[in-house]
Image (cartoon, helix red, strand yellow):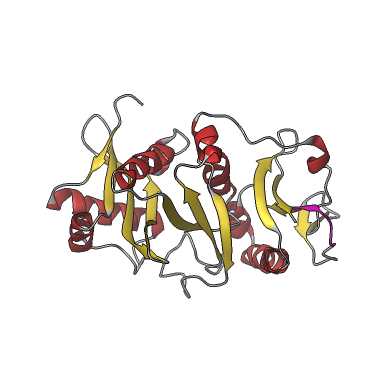
Amino acid sequence: MQNVTIRQLNSHNEYRECVQLQRDTWGENFTETVSPAIQKVSQKLGGVTAGAFDESGTLIGFVFGLTGLKDGKPVHWSDMLAVRPEWRGKGIGRRLKLFQREEVRKLGIETMYWTYDPLEAGNAHLNLNRLGARISEYVENMYATDEGSTLHAGLGMDRFIVQWNLNEERVERALRGEPPFIDENVMAAPVINTKDSDKGDIEPVEGDLPDAPIVRVEIPADIQRVKKKSSNEGSRWRINTRRVFNHYLAHGYVVDAFYRDRETNRCFYLIKK
C-alpha cells in the first residue's frame, strides 16, 4: 500500500485512462462518463480529479468532484469514485476521499456531498463508519435511469445524499479509526422490514412501521449477489427500503448508524427519532 500514490490527474493520457476506468466499472454502455475535457476544466475551478496509481504508474482508482455554492456557501460535490476490483477492500477508496477532503479544505470548504445506493452495504460502511459522514436525504430515482450501467441495472437509482462535515468531531473520530459507539439496547431495537423465510433466508416484508425511538432497517449483505440470483428479489428490497426510509425521514427520524452483525453477517441501519 505504501507504493500506491494519490494525486491529481495531469495529462491527457491519464484523463483517457480515467474514462476507461469508468467504463470498466459501470459498463461499456455507461452513458454518463466524465470526459477528459471536463476532468481538466473542473480542476481550474476548485474541482478534484484525482487518481490512485500503483508502483508501475497504472491508474487503479479515481475520484471526481465539483465545487460550487449551496445556500451562499462554497461546498464540494463528489460525483464519482471507483476502484478496480482487484484493489478493492484495501483502503484505496478511503484514501481517495481523504485526499479529496484535504484538497477542498485548502479552499476553505467545510462541507462535501455525494450520493450512494442505500442497499450497498460496503458503501454504507465506508461512508458512515470509516468517514463519519451523515445521511441528509433520501431521493427516489436520483438519476432517473440506470445510465446504461450494468452495476445499477435492475435496482433503479434511489440514493442517499451524504453530507460530510469535514471538520466535525464525528469525522475526526472516524478518521482516527474509532468505531461508532452502538449501545447494546440499540442493537435490540425492532427490525421493521424483514422476516426469516421458510428457506432459512432473510426476506423483505411490508409490515407496520412503529413510532419507536429507535428502529433497525435491514439490507442485504451483498445486494449485487441478490440481484444476480433474482432481479425480482432485488426490486423487492428496493421497494421495501424506499417505503421505510421515506416514512421515517419524513417523520423526524435520522439515519444514525450502520453496522454488520459479526456472528450472522446481517446488516442494519439504525434510525433514531
**Quadrant housing the N terminus:** top left
Measuring from the top left, give residue 121's x and y in whole percent.
60, 48
Q: Is residue 65 above or below residue 88?
A: below
Measuring from the top left, give residue 24's x and y in whole percent.
34, 54
Q: Is residue 147 above or below residue 80?
A: below
Measuring from the top left, give residue 8's x and y in whole percent.
23, 44
Is 129 a magenta residue? no
Instruction: Write the residue at 27% across / 51% down.
Output: 49
Measuring from the top left, give residue 130's x and y in whole percent.
53, 38
Start-end of magenta stretch: 211-216
86 relative to 269 in the view: left or right: left
Judge by depth and name the residue closer to the eye, 213 or 29. Answer: 213
Residue furthest to the left: 12
Instruction: Write the residue at 16% across / 47% down.
Output: 10
Judge by depth and name the residue closer to the eye, 95 or 226. Answer: 95
Residue furthest to the bottom: 144
Residue 193: name its quadrant.
bottom right
**Quadrant housing the C terminus:** bottom right
Residue furthest to the top: 2
Instruction: Write the residue at 48% across / 49% down.
Output: 164
